[in-house]
Amino acid sequence: MKEPGSRAASPHAHPSPAAIGDRPAASPAESPLAGKPAPRRPGRPSGGGGGAEQRERLIAVALALFARQGIVDTSLGAIAREAGVTPAMVHYYFKTRDQLIDVIIDERFVPLRSSMGGWLEKNPGDPVAALTALTQRFVDVAQTHPWFAPLWVREVISEGGLLRQRMHERYGDEHQRAAHEAIERWQREGKLNAALEPSLLFQSLMGLTLLPLATAHVWRNDLVPRRVGAEEIARHAVALITQGIRPA
């Protein structure tokens, strides 16, 4: 029998403070949402070191494709397929192919050009030592970066090469002019063969080194008496430039 004034507890009644105090509040670690990252928008790569590594990987894939099949025939979609990512991933880092080319020039070719400098400054009065040093640097760069020689053949010396056009627009030909002036000075001083054409010597040296390295997969299948590597190519180029075909 109920006492006067009492009433049954409603199933919808709020628990008393004492009842709440009987149960400890859930800590953040116990929360079902604790430890879970915030939802990420689809199609956008995460930031941090992983994003930088992905960007570098896409540049490397692009360089390999450009060297193998040319820039014109390589779309951003082709780069995505080769890298095993979605086209949206490539577009996140590089909006257009032109932007990608600018990145390659700034982040790959400009540092390489800087690394090949100094051959004139270190050997101002010795053309043989200067040209030998430059030849070795061409070979070293091509060995360190396998894409460099074939890409140079496809896109720098070939008519209509996109890379040559873009590099000339942005950086001109200051380095080649300096080499041309040094060659003329050495000829006037009697230190270099006067019959050499100054405007062709620099190009000839690049051709004697980079062209064989870029086409090694072709001529190494021919009847070559022994394996010819980078060092042999460098030595051959220097001998032709400094001694010609006459016996030493």
Image (cartoon, rainbow, N blue to C red):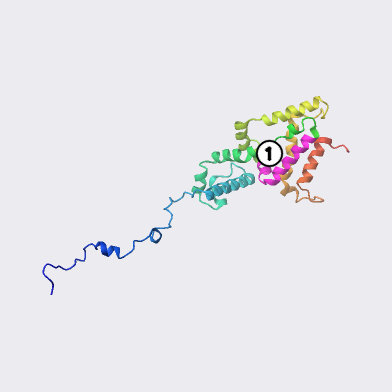
In the image, taking residue 31 as reference, residue 226 lies left or right, namely: right
Majority secondary structure in the magenta region: helix
Report the residue that reaches farthest toward the bottom. Answer: 1
- Mark 1 — residue? 115
Q: Quadrant of the C terminus?
A: top right
Give the x, y percent position of residue 181.
Answer: 73, 27
Q: Residue at 53% of width from left, 50% of height from top?
A: 50
Q: What amino acid is labelled 1 in the image?
A: Ser
Q: Compare residues 158 and 235 and report the one nearer the observer.
A: 235
Q: Is residue 10 above or below residue 185?
A: below
Quarter of the image where one finds residue 156: top right
Which class describes the residues within 10 Å of circle 1: few (<14), some (14-19), or many (20+)? few
Dot 1: element = helix
Q: Compare residues 145 and 101 and report the one nearer the observer.
A: 145
Q: Is residue 9 above or below residue 156?
A: below
In the image, taking residue 170 as reference, residue 8 lies left or right, namely: left
Q: Compare residues 7 and 57 and report the one nearer the observer.
A: 7
In the image, taking residue 28 as reference, residue 73 lies left or right, namely: right
Task: Say how many tags the image has.
Answer: 1
Q: Is residue 73 magenta?
A: no
Q: Is residue 82 above or below residue 125?
A: below
Quarter of the image where one finds residue 234: top right
Give the x, y percent position of residue 238.
Answer: 80, 38
Give the x, y percent position of residue 232.
Answer: 79, 45
Q: Is residue 150 magenta?
A: yes
Q: Is residue 103 visible?
A: yes
Report the residue that reaches farthest toward the left. Answer: 4
Q: Quadrant of the N terminus?
A: bottom left
Magenta-colored span: 129-153
Report the residue that reaches farthest toward the top. Answer: 188
Q: Is residue 78 visible?
A: no
